[in-house]
């Protein structure tokens, strides 16, 4: 509870909490509870992809999977310009609480990333970046990131040694990632800044599960604030071969699936989704998707394009609300959603965890 109160204090002092934003979040919550597509509201969480290009070849990612054959990411790959980001953010900034820079490319490949963050901070949004950590090569870059006003940075570190790390982060260099984390911690201390919070996120696989204690020790040594572990996504959307799925499958309580062949969820899947009631995913080309996870899926349902129709936000258009109604009636028929609980999680170190904590705190506050 103390962590929640401290979070609200920081967001209030930083100007993130405004009357419009709080009311918008609570209204979305009411629509969600009543199973009604939102009307006259806006997303509380913006998941924005700064870059559709990546330096790694992760075998279960649409950008990296089968890269020699062109990958499974079918949409245009590119960078989100500052001008286009402003067009997108200006539609939602009065009501959104969080802007998370994450997608199916590496955010720091975008040369304008710090300017994107600074603009979101100018609009008083909470900001977060999820990175593979290969591009904060020196102190100068790290200081620039800190000075942008970034609130949270999450490093994907899937192994405590190079041999384990490169099993999933193909073409990755763990020492380079460790240097980036250390540079961020040093830069934050150098200019006496409280932010960004530095988090390490690790996917649980047969390679990383035995290294949990080593990862905790390594993160402390590098100056990180938190370590999160999350289950791996083996979904068919990247068309990965069965051998790859078997290699990364981790059974029991550490997996979201009963087995690696059927990929049937261990969790009970209901006709609901908190993501599409609270957030929207926006790709680097402006394409909007039901959630951040789906902006990389081949043949997904495109909700619209935030750059092509500036005056008609994708959030409540006919296509989006039709998708919401399908979630409420026949979620199992949607390939991308049939194994997903659709629940915003308190763990995982990503933007959903932040929104989850804020929303639950507001619920507690309004009950008293």
Image (spheres, grey):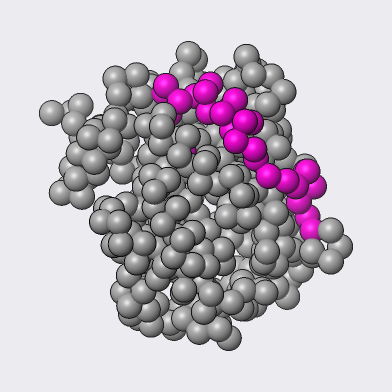
Give 189 or 309, whichever is nearer the viewer.
189
Residue 110, percent across and down?
62, 49
Give 18 or 255, whichever is nearer the viewer.
18
Residue 17, percent across and down?
29, 29
Is 76 magenta? The answer is yes
Residue at (42%, 67%) from the top-left corner? 183
Q: Is residue 88 above or below residue 130?
A: above
Q: Is residue 255 visible?
A: no
- Which residues lie in the magenta part? 71-99
Would residue 101 be found to the left or right of residue 61 on screen? left
Q: Is residue 241 above or below residue 82?
A: below
Residue 28, percent across and down?
41, 25
Residue at (73%, 75%) from the top-left corner? 243
What residue occupies the far left of the structure in this picture? 368
Image quadrant where residue 201 sits: bottom left
Q: Is residue 275 above or below residue 254?
A: above
Would residue 249 be found to the left or right of residue 279 on screen? right
Residue at (46%, 74%) from the top-left corner? 178
Is 343 magenta? The answer is no
What residue occupies the far right of the structure in this picture? 69
Residue 203, percent across and down?
50, 67
Would residue 70 be found to the left or right of residue 281 on screen? right
Image quadrant where residue 170 sits: bottom right
Q: Is residue 188 visible?
A: yes
State which quarter of the image contains the C terminus.
Answer: top left
How many labels were placed on the picture?
A: 0
Residue at (67%, 66%) from the top-left corner? 56
């Amino acid at each position: 509870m103390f962590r929640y109160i401290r979070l609200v204090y920081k967001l209030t002092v930083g100007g993130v909490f405004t009357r419009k934003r709080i009311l918008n979040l609570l209204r979305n919550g009411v629509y969600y509870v009543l199973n009604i597509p939102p009307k006259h509201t806006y997303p509380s969480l913006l998941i924005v992809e700064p870059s559709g290009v990546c330096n790694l070849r992760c075998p279960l990612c649409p950008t990296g999977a089968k890269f020699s054959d062109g990958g499974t990411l079918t949409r245009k790959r590119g960078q989100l310009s500052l001008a286009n980001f402003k067009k997108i953010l200006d539609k939602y900034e009065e009501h959104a609480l969080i802007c998370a820079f994450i997608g199916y490319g590496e955010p720091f490949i975008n040369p304008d990333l710090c300017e994107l963050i600074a603009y979101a901070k100018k609009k008083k949004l909470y900001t977060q970046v999820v990175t593979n950590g290969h591009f904060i090569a020196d102190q100068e870059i790290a200081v620039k990131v800190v000075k942008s006003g970034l609130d949270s940075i999450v490093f994907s570190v899937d192994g405590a040694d190079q041999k384990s790390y490169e099993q999933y982060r193909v073409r990755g260099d763990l020492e380079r990632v460790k240097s980036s984390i250390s540079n961020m911690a040093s830069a934050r201390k150098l200019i006496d800044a409280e932010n960004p919070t530095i988090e390490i996120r690790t996917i649980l696989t047969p390679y990383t599960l035995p290294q949990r204690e080593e990862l905790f020790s390594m993160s402390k040594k590098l100056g990180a604030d938190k370590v999160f572990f999350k289950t791996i996504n083996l979904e068919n959307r990247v068309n990965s071969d069965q051998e790859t799925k078997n290699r990364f499958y981790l059974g029991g309580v550490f997996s979201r699936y009963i087995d690696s062949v059927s990929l049937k969820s261990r969790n009970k899947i209901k006709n609901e989704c908190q993501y599409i009631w609270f957030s929207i995913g926006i790709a680097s080309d402006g394409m909007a998707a039901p959630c951040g996870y789906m902006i990389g899926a081949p043949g997904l349902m495109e909700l619209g394009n935030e750059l092509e129709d500036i005056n008609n936000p994708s959030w409540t258009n006919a296509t989006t609300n039709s998708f919401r109604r399908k979630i409420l009636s026949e979620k199992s028929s949607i390939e991308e959603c049939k194994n997903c609980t659709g629940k915003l999680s308190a763990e995982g170190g990503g933007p959903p965890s932040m929104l989850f904590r804020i929303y639950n705190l507001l619920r507690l506050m309004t009950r008293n």
